[in-house]
Image (cartoon, rainbow, N blue to C red):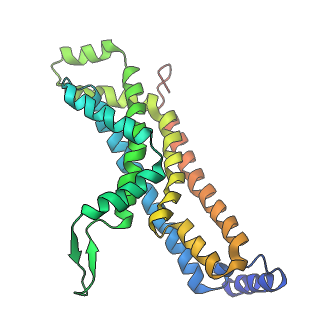
Amino acid sequence: MLEAIREFFRELAESHPKWNFIFFHDATQWERVVSGFWVTIELSVVCVVVSVLIGIAGAWLQGSPLRLLRSIVQGYIQFFRNTPPLIQLLFFYFALGQFTPAVTAADGWTVEPIISNVGWAIISLSFFAGAFNVEIFRAGIEAVPESTKEAAEALGMSRLQIYVYVVLPLAFRVSLPALNNNLVNLVKTTTQALAIAVPELLYQMVGIWNDFPSAQNPAMVVLFSAYILLVGILVLGMNKWERTMRIPGYGA
């Protein structure tokens, strides 16, 4: 079966040179596509999780009685919301990356930075999406009735306990629609990691059509299809989660 598929795409490439799906009949190129797809998935999952944690922590700090903490969080939000994510990525990798220490690799000769290009991509993209998540969760927190918080205080709960056990679960439900949109944008923004040579799917596809110009059109088709699939799974999962967490008559 697999050999028949490979043969079909070989014949297609011969009869239609502009539609050379080389990664479907060349094992080496197929490995590059699979490798890039897995890096994209790993990058997306880690950035989604870290950005949500940043949003939760930042929203809590926004309600801190300490003015300095609130100012730091506000400065962080303004910086990352008002500068392009690509510029942030380049700044983290090329500017801050110069100040990170390096270690000797296992071969005893190569010197490698402690934070790789993949690491900087995760840091940069997570902070970028996290700034929006802070505001999303803040809006959700403001939707929680003050009487609910006061009732929790009357029971002797601390500010952190009220946030974790009372406010956050309710705010999360209200925040899910906006959070859904932001996380979808984050997954699409991971393509910008190409700029610092992170070997994700777009990077691998560009490499393939540079090596095989006849594969440019097929590479774009596969690239679009892969992101439609990836984003579609995320949207379906988030929508299902949103329906599951909905409280009748309250918020989302």
Q: Quadrant of residue 112?
A: bottom left
56 above or below 234? above
Q: Is residue 177 visible?
A: yes
Q: Position of residue 123 (x, y in %)?
A: 35, 54
Task: Name the residue nearer the viewer: 59 or 120.
Answer: 120
Left or right: 127, with 213 as reference point: left
Q: Position of residue 86 (x, y in %)?
A: 47, 53
Count all numbered tags in the image, as a single digit.
0
Q: Position of residue 50 (x, y in %)?
A: 35, 49
Residue under the point 29% across and 34% down: 73
Left or right: 10, with 244 as reference point: right
Q: Is residue 244 visible?
A: no
Q: Quadrant of residue 122?
A: bottom left
Task: Name the residue nearer the viewer: 246 or 205.
Answer: 205
The quarter of the rendered structure image containing the N terminus is bottom right
Residue under the point 78% across and 76% down: 18
24 above or below 159? below
Residue under the point 46% across and 56% down: 44
